[in-house]
Image: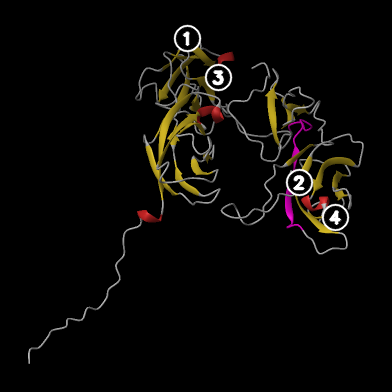
Amino acid sequence: MDGTVTLKRSLTLHEGYEVFTVHAWDANGKKHTVSIRVEYVDHLKGHQMDTVMNISSKMKPHFDDMILTFPKSSTGLKRAKRGWVIPPVNIPENSRGPFPMKLVQIKSDFALETQMVYSITGEGADQDPKGIFTIERLTGNLYVTQPLKREKKASYRLIVHATGLGVNIAEKPMEIVISVIDQNDNKPVFTQNPFNAKRGWVIPPVNIPENSRGPFPMKLVQIKSDFALETQMVYSITGEGADQDPKGIFTIERLSGNLMVTQPLDREKKASYRLVAHATGLGVNIAEKPMDIVIIVSDQNDNKPVFTQNPFNGSVHEAAEIGYEFMTVTATDADDPNEYNGIVSYAIVSQEPQLPKTNMFEINNSTGIIRVRELGMDRKQWPRYTLLIEAADMNGYGLSTNGTAVITVTDDSDKEPHFEQTSVRQITNNAK
């Protein structure tokens, strides 16, 4: 709540850094966004250096120290093909420059051996809108040449190329996504002005947070007819929660039109109610056309995730490659799946045994897919692993529950024996 960023669990910075964004909303509902880059700093002169966190100030990105490095190819049981996995580069729209403004530096490992030449293709480079992005051919510095407008284009997809200068060396092309971060620079615009329409009631849904503590009955809104300026109107309601099940949840004061809720609501039992309001003149022949009122029950984070089973059982071959996916754990949350309250994130809390390494497996925090993270599994020494899995809502920062994944390590001896059919010749001795 105070803006402090903390490390929730042990983290390996495979690329040497991690980039993410933090959003905040002020009292007026205005959204503010900053980019954060966390990098590891080695011990220096015997003194321990803390993790460095570079935070953009007033939406001005700090790109000067960002380097995207071509990964080294791997051999053996590791991923054989070369690949680049990098986060999008975020640029706030309407930046004031100065231009050209450096975004990031592209660098190849081959640069340690020879001079590399860098180039870019794609949207904003050699494709329309052309010339927005450029790259210095020898340094790899990627630049933006002008302010960007998210409402015109929200993202750009570039391809970066690196080839040796005068030698037959070339990196596999890498894709970079440039995301333009929205600023509040547009006012709402009416679809027409003036609006000409026949007399009617058009009101937005009435929102009620679930589990409200009252006091009850609690006023929600006042219904009022224009005819009330001429005569006393009488108000009534029908529909769900009024004269239909579940009855008695909503009432209306017949003369004032005050709509009331009589008890706490539970979104998981019923997420919305549709009422019809009626208004008639008291003692005169006047009646409004009935009006629909939708009551929306706003979700609160009052339900923990629940694993669909416990434990989860899976198996993996001891020679499986890094990145091999072999099982999935799943959890559900009764809260609104369209809100953070109902979005479940997964994490591995512990591994037993912690051999030969403490983090032999990793989990996709969104899907629950478990994959191999390290090599060295040995069925004879460690035939089974038990993982303690945490499922937490609010994208990993809310209510949580723990479950277990049991992983059986297999090898070739676990295959069923296969006998080949052979012919047997019976030899008999005939006595002479």
Membership of 144 in magenta stretch: no
| 166 relative to 85 in the view: left or right | right
| Alpha carbons under labels 1 and 4: distance apart | 73 Å
**Residue at which label 4 appears:** 114
Up/down of 234 relative to 399, above or below: above
Query: Which mark lies nearer to you, 4 or 2?
Result: 4
- Callout 2 amino acid: Thr
Q: Residue at image x 69%, y 50%?
A: 84
Label 4 vs label 3: CA separation? 81 Å
Q: Residues within 10 Å of mark 3 (few under 14, many from 20)?
A: many
Q: Is residue 273 visible?
A: no
Count neighbours of disc 2 (C-alpha within 10 A) and say few if under 14, some if 14 to 19, many if 20 or more.
some
| For residue 427, side relative to residue 286 (left or right) | left
- Tell me if 47 is positioned left or right of 271 in this view: right
Say which quadrant the C terminus sits in: bottom left
Q: Position of residue 169 (x, y in %)?
A: 79, 61
Q: CA distance from mark 2 to mark 3?
A: 67 Å
Query: Which residues fall within the magenta stretch?
Result: 171-188
Give the residue displayed 56% in from the left and 53% down from the top.
Answer: 77
Three-letter residue code for mark 1 = Gly
Q: Position of residue 26 (x, y in %)?
A: 70, 20
Q: Earlier in the sequence, mark 1 or mark 4?
A: 4
Could you say which disc has been placed on residue 225 in the image?
A: 3
- The amino acid marked with disc number 3 is Ser
Farthest residue, direction top: 215
Residue linked to disc 2: 69
Q: Which callout, 4 or 3, points at the residue further toward the start of the chain?
A: 4
Q: Position of residue 25 (x, y in %)?
A: 69, 23
Looking at the image, do the residues carrying marks 1 and 4 touch, with CB atoms under 8 Å apart? no
Nearer the viewer's eye, disc 1 or disc 4? 4
Q: Is residue 182 on the magenta stretch? A: yes
